[in-house]
Amino acid sequence: MKVQVRVFAGSRRVEVNGQGEFLKVYLTAPPLDGRANDALIEVLARHFSVRRSAISIIKGLKSRDKIISIETI
């Protein structure tokens, strides 16, 4: 499954909002040295109840707009 995500790094809360295939993800991690990407994978793994290794960033490693691939069973 592919999901479009807009990341708000450096936020005061950790939250996942969205409709359909577009998600807004708020993270407290700063957008430095890949910390926000690591936090994004962790939050999405909990949100979709999958392993961290089942989630990968396909496009947008250095952008706030990303395309995420989630492997499902």
Image (cartoon, rainbow, N blue to C red):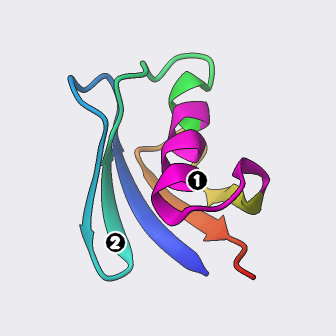
- Residue at position x 57%, y 23% from top? 35
Is residue 51 magenta-colored? Answer: yes
Tally of numbered discs? 2
- Sooner in the amino-acid sequence: mark 2 or mark 1: 2
Residue under label 2: 22
- Count neighbours of disc 1 (C-alpha within 10 A) and say few if under 14, some if 14 to 19, many if 20 or more: some
Q: Are marks 2 and 1 in contact (CB under 8 Å)?
A: no
Q: Which amino acid, mark 1?
A: Ala
Q: Is residue 15 above or below residue 58?
A: above
Q: Quadrant of the C terminus?
A: bottom right
Work out whether residue 39 or residue 62 is closer to the camera in this orientation and state it: 39
Q: Quadrant of the N terminus?
A: bottom right
Work out whether residue 40 or residue 63 is closer to the camera in this orientation and state it: 40
| Horizontal side of residue 1 vs 9, given as left or right | right
By secondary structure, the bulk of the magenta-drawn segment is best described as helix
Q: Is residue 21 above or below residue 32?
A: below
| Horizontal side of residue 24 vs 49, given as left or right | left
Work out whether residue 43 or residue 31 is closer to the camera in this orientation and state it: 43
Q: Which residues are magenta?
A: 38-53
Percent across and percent down for residue 45 are 58, 53
Q: Secondary structure at mark 1?
A: helix
Q: Which amino acid, mark 2?
A: Phe
Q: Which dot marks residue 45?
A: 1
In which quarter of the view is residue 41 placed? top right
Q: Is residue 16 above or below residue 4?
A: above
- Residue at position x 52%, y 64% from top? 48
Most distant residue in the front direction: 49
Is residue 13 magenta-colored? Answer: no
